[in-house]
Amino acid sequence: GETRIAGFNYWAAILGTSWFFYRKLYVHALAYLFIQFGLPFLASLAAIFLFPEAVSVHGYVLGFGLLCGLIVVGFWANLALCHRAVRVIRRVDDLNFDNELHLETIAGAGGVNFPAFFIALLVEGLFWRLMAL
């Protein structure tokens, strides 16, 4: 019955998809890819069709969409991490391990993934580079 709102995660807002990969939240990372790149692109396309003569509007719509995506991921990241932690702890609790093995199992299930983080940063950087062309 308690709220699981954990506040705004600045690192997730700055790093975006890479942060999700770093924290091993792979499904959330892929979903955020769509939000980060797909929705602003679709909004920009809609602006092109609705306001074909106002070229400056397209950039504002794209920028506003990207900013909204950063705000969404800032709140979404902590919620996703909290839900994953609760799910892992409940799964380990069901195994009925002794205290030391219980804590080791939880620690092993958590953690971070540095290679996925750096690969995601590289891919995201390449994508932004292609968008700038």
Image (cartoon, grey):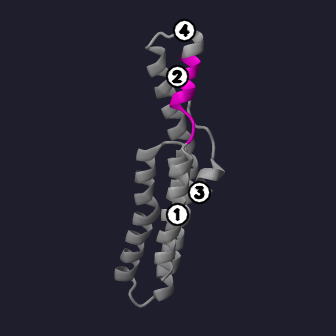
Figure check: 4 above or below 41: above
Secondary structure beneath label 3: helix
- In space, the residues marked 1 and 3 are separated at their CA atoms by 12 Å
Q: Nearer the viewer, mark 3 or mark 2?
A: 2
Q: Main secondary structure of the magenta part?
A: helix
Assess disc 1: are there few (<14), some (14-19) or many (≥20) residues with their C-alpha within 10 Å of its C-alpha: few
CA neighbours of label 4 inside 10 A, class few (<14), some (14 to 19), many (20+): few
What amino acid type should be assigned to the residue bearing mark 2?
Thr
Callout 2 secondary element? helix
Q: Is residue 110 magenta?
A: yes
The residues tagged by marks 3 and 2 sit, at their Cα atoms, a distance apart of 28 Å
Residue named by callout 4:
98
Residue pointed to by mark 2: 105
The image quadrant of residue 78 is top right
Of label 4 and label 3, which has the lower sequence position?
3
Q: Provide residue 118's location: percent of width, then percent of height.
A: 55, 56
Looking at the image, which residue sits at the far bottom? 53
In depth, the one of 89 and 76 nearer the eye is 89
Residue 3 lies, with reference to residue 21, above or below; the image says above
What stretch of residues is rendered in magenta? 102-112
